[in-house]
Amino acid sequence: MTITKRADMVVHEQEPYNAEPPRGALAGEAITPIESFYGRNHGRMPTTDPDTWRLVVDGLVDRALTLSLEELQTRFEAHEVVATLQCAGNRRAGLLAVRDIPGQHPWGPAATSTARWRGARLADVLAAAGLRSDASEIAFLAPDVAPEAQPPAPYGGSISTDKAVSGEVLLAWQMNGQPLPDAHGAPVRVVVPGWIGARSVKWIERITAQDHPSDNFFQQSAYRLLPPENDDPAPGDGVALTAVALNSEILRPDDQAVLPAGPVEISGYAYAGGDRDVVRVDVSVDGGRSWAQADLDRRLGRWAWRLWHTTVTLPAGQHQIVARAWDSTAALQPEHAASLWNPKGYINNAWPSITVSIHP
Ligand code: MTE
Ligand code: MO
């Protein structure tokens, strides 16, 4: 398996490969180059042969399908969606600073990236199979085996039928105009725009319509929000994560940067999943005492993050820069990570903060 990433990736684990780019690498680019796109893997990446690959669609459908890559690409119209993927563990480092979370990667600000995906609509494939009205969940299954599932089991998960037939969910074979790279799920992956990255199952082999959520470890045990006091969760405890919470990060300058006097450009991303949009980002250069609004870039469609930037002039000395985003439901990010701590360390969407020093 070849993984073509920039040399300065922050690698949390080599095998299975788990890595994010340095925060500055995401700045200013609405579409993340593949070499900078984060990688999140629960097991050894499988090698799949596009010629022998088959996709099975079964369960609560009138006619089960078995599709080759060529059939998927020729029987169904191709669509493009620009979508941000965000791991539920993005920014976990901020939760680890509150209290330890054993056995989970200390993701920083960059376990999120945006690509232009091209593929068939899951809705069209389900329609061709004759999706039955008693199917409330669509389950996905991949061949990669995750040792953390006990006993070790293939990766999977499910999404609601409502989301599955919404039109934006793709069975993607292209990423940024290139054939989907092996490391991102070749030959075909699911892309579930607006939902946590975990549901965008790579190397997809089987799609099952059913009347209950997937019983896969990554649906029933991982990727669930647990109350802080639950330190010995049973399968099904807590809430399965779906849409991405409102979140933001500062991408430039880097944390702990030492900068010359003069104008400083501050930039970052903000993202709200589901049907929401980011409508405002405030930036403070005095640790949150006073705020000014940043400029928001146009977003590349309703499933993409919003990049933002502002320019400030700072006096010599140390400064704490803080950001906070608001969404179209008038929700604001929570201020402190302490109130967000949870046993698996998901969804840290507290106000991001960095410290910079300006030369005299
Ligand atoms: N699909 C499979 N088959 N195996 C995995 O380990 N990881 C999931 C999801 N799909 C995973 C998977 C998680 S947790 C995330 S955040 C995204 O893929 C990451 O996608 P990427 O590696 O393309 O960035
Ligand atoms: Mo993830």
Image (cartoon, grey):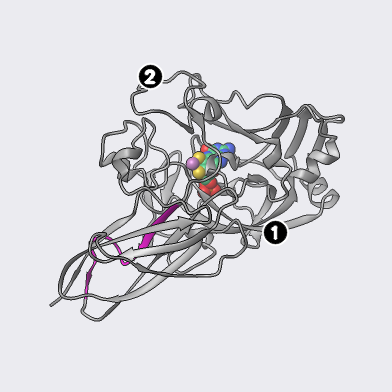
The disc at residue 55 is none
Give how far across and how far down residue 41 sits, in percent. 49, 40
Name the outermost residue toward the front.
330
Amino acid on which disc 2 is placed: Asp
> Quick check: 183 left or right of 13?
right
Q: Is residue 223 above or below residue 174?
A: above
Q: Pointer 2: residues within 10 angstroms few (<14), some, or many (20+)?
A: few
The residues bearing labels 1 and 2 have C-alpha atoms spaced at a distance of: 42 Å
Camera sees residue 45? no
Q: Quadrant of residue 285?
A: bottom left
User: Between 160 and 55, which is closer to the camera in this rendering?
Assistant: 160
Give how far across and how far down residue 83 sits, in percent. 59, 55
> Residue at point 75% right, 50% down?
120
Answer whether residue 253 is magenta in the image. yes
- Quadrant of the snapshot with the C terminus: bottom left
Label 1–label 2 contact, CB within 8 A: no
> Residue at point 63% right, 27% down?
213
Give how far across and how far down residue 89 sits, in percent. 42, 42
SS under mark 2: loop
> Quick check: 14 left or right of 123?
left
Give the residues drawn in magenta, as a range: 247-259
Q: Quadrant of residue 100?
A: top left
Camera sees residue 337? yes
SS under mark 1: strand
The answer to which of marks 1 and 2 sits earlier in the sequence is 1
On whether ligand 1 comes within 8 Å of the CB at mark 2, the answer is no
The disc at residue 80 is 1
Amino acid on which disc 1 is placed: Glu
Name the outermost residue toward the bottom.
262
Answer whether residue 297 is magenta in the image. no
Q: Main secondary structure of the magenta part?
A: strand
Residue under label 2: 232
